[in-house]
Image (spheres, rainbow, N blue to C red):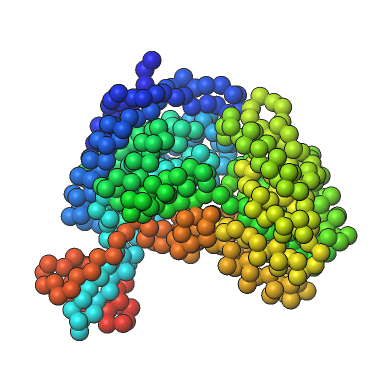
Amino acid sequence: MVLQEVLVAGKWRNSKNPVGTFNTINPAAKTELPESYPVSSLEEVLEVIEAGKKAADIMRSISPGKIADFLDKFAENIEARTEELVKLANIETALPKEPRLRSSELPRTIDQLHQAASAARERSWCHAVIDTKSNIHSMYGALGGPVVVFGPNNFPFAFNSVAGGDFAAAIAAGNPVIAKANPGHAGTTKILAEAALEAVISSGLPESTVQLIYRTKPDVGLQLVSHPFIGATGFTGGRAGGLKLKEAADKAGKPIYLEMSSVNPIFILPGALNERLDAIAAELYGSCSLGAGQFCTNPGLLIIEKNTGGENFIHTLAKLFGENKPGTLLSSSGPKNIADAIEVLTKAGAEVVVGGKEAEGSGYAFSNTLLKVPGEVFIKNPALLQTEAFGTVSLIITAKNVDQMVEIAKHFEGNLTGCIYSHTGGKDDPAYGKIEPVLRAKVGRLLNDKTPTGVAVVSSMNHGGPYPATGHPGFTAVGIPASMMRFAALHCYDNVRPHRLPEELRAKNPTGKMWRLIDGEWTQKNI
């Protein structure tokens, strides 16, 4: 059996003493793809870590401009390989070439790399603070060790362990990256790593700036994130795996930033339903079914009042769920995982309105499923009734009145997003005023009259939230420069002679555009 090569210390090579192999699956055809990939041993992982540490030491003295050049060049290399990437990602994930992969996700990936390059080059992200009276200076800088990135299966480009948001943020902050590919799109990740290595060489960065392994045994993954040389870890994936990694990293005192499960509650107030019921139902179905429901911002909970409008809404939405064909799931485990989640929900008191079973066909699929549960039942059993089903599955909670909606919101776990649909003329303002303060504390991004599945790659975006949506409510996985702060350390210089300070903290502004806080005033001026 010929195995695909790993990228270690700047070289593509055969894996040393692999402890297993795997093949990716075409989920649309339920067939195994011919390429086989190695499961890396602890010995190989330790070698990767050593090389990453050497790269981190070298990158301390490399200019931000050179790092920015790498990011720009990498983005150009990706664009040059568009057709190859889109073709293979489509085969490995069953996500449509158009508009999803070619016209949406790949341009987003290229753009966020360019954004990261701009932030690294301009340098305001490092929050330079200069106090001339005390002669104390501080700024954010690289961690001094490689960043491990675990990518998810549902975004083969934009959240890829090579090229995705965590990767871009970590590199822009001055750190090398150890990429652990998602087995669902290992081939796509390998192409991205090839493009990255070309950019590393042409821009003059250390050879080990980007390394790639495909898979490890679970215990080796725990040792990877907790190794003394590791700077931090970025993880996007399921809660069970994320929490195991978090426990290992926490015990070792290593930062780890997790994006895990989220059911993204949406309140639909009575005035909104009276005003535009059909339009809201269509919007929500489109959001719930986008990417076969395999979005971390998929609306999993819908809260409405139990009245005639609410019953009409359930009927309308159920018709949309029932009449439309379900999309293809990313993996063979998808249907079983959804079925298991629905079993938990129904045992906790929910009732299936439509769907609830695996769909027939050539690919992995599960019927579009809508459930409902009374508000008082949810309040008695909120933990189980917030079980995430990673597909086109939503649970409607019927509340007696607005006060019960507020009580329901109090029982939510932390989520990435939360939304309130309201009457455009203000008839729902009193209800909004009661619900919003409670919901605000439960979510990272609050939306009004808008579905949550679109995540704009802009500096104001928060793609984070309270636990268990993430491991820390103060950070975002999308939005530069804020996302870079996860992979930075605060460096303070007390009475250090001027010529020994980093450029960012000297009298002259190194770029002329960089914002610095000098004696309490934000300025772009020299001292």
Q: Position of residue 281 (x, y in %)?
A: 76, 53
Left or right: 147 in relation to 342: left
- Quadrant of the rendered structure where residue 302 is? bottom right
* Residue 113 visible from this viewpoint: no
In percent of width and height, residue 480 lies at 41, 59
Q: Please determine whether, in this image, residue 206 is positioned above or below residue 35.
A: below
Q: Observer-nearest residue: 413 or 501? A: 413
Looking at the image, which residue is at 51% across and 30% down? 92
With 215 as the anchor, is 304 left or right in this view?
Answer: right
Q: Residue at x 56, y 49 (%)?
A: 261
Residue 160 position within the rendered picture, expressed as x and y whole percent measured from the top left = 44, 42
**In this view of the protein, which residue sits in the foreground, 2 or 469?**
469
Query: Residue sitting at 58 percent across and 52 percent down?
Result: 262
Residue sitting at 82 percent across and 55 percent down? 313
Q: Quadrant for the C terminus, please.
A: bottom left
Residue located farthest toward the top when viewing the structure as drawn: 1
